[in-house]
Image (tube, rainbow, N blue to C red):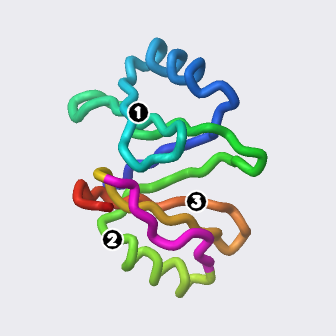
Amino acid sequence: MVQALLVRAPHRVLRAEKFYAAVFDWNFQRYPGAPAYYGMATTGESNPGINGALFQRTPDSETTLTMETDSIEKSTAKILAEGGTVVQDKTPIPSMGWFATYKDTEGNKFGLFTNDPNAA
């Protein structure tokens, strides 16, 4: 199953967090080693929705569609074989998993995530 999340860094992250919590009943958690503000949104196993994050916007922030994959390495090989490029190599999100970003053949940026509670 492919899960996707759409992340757009808000200017006022706490206000955005309050909004999404109220509208969608999301819960936000902080993780050690994450950027200054990084709140993971979870909906729970039995609830439809999105598992995603909010983080502090920077001048170059943009929206990133991120898909979950079983293997970032295998997906990276396919992306490169089809003409995509690596923007950010596989990077740990401590206690959560691994994240990497790419550009497709048209220059659109997207991300991949693999769950791994041992990521450090």
- Relative to the observer, which residue lies in front, 30 or 106? 30
Which residue occupies 49% across, 39% down?
38
Q: How crowded is mark 3: few (under 14 residues within 10 Å), some or many (20 or more)?
A: some
**What residue would you read off at disc 3?**
110
Q: State which mark lies toward you, 3 or 1.
A: 1
**Quadrant where the C terminus lies?**
bottom left
Name the amino acid type tagged 2.
Answer: Ser
Q: What residue type is labelled 1?
A: Ala
In primary-sequence order, the first of circles 1 and 2 is: 1
| Residues at discs 3 and 1 in contact (Cβ within 8 Å) | no
Q: How far apart are marks 3 and 1 (CA)?
A: 19 Å
The quadrant of the rendering that contains the N terminus is bottom left
Residue 13, position as x, y percentages in the image:
59, 27
**Residue for point 53% across, 37% down:** 37
Which numbered disc, 1 or 2, marks the residue closer to the eye?
Answer: 1
* Residue 85 falls within the magenta-colored stretch: yes
- Which residue corresponds to mark 2? 71
Q: Give the range drawn in magenta.
A: 84-94
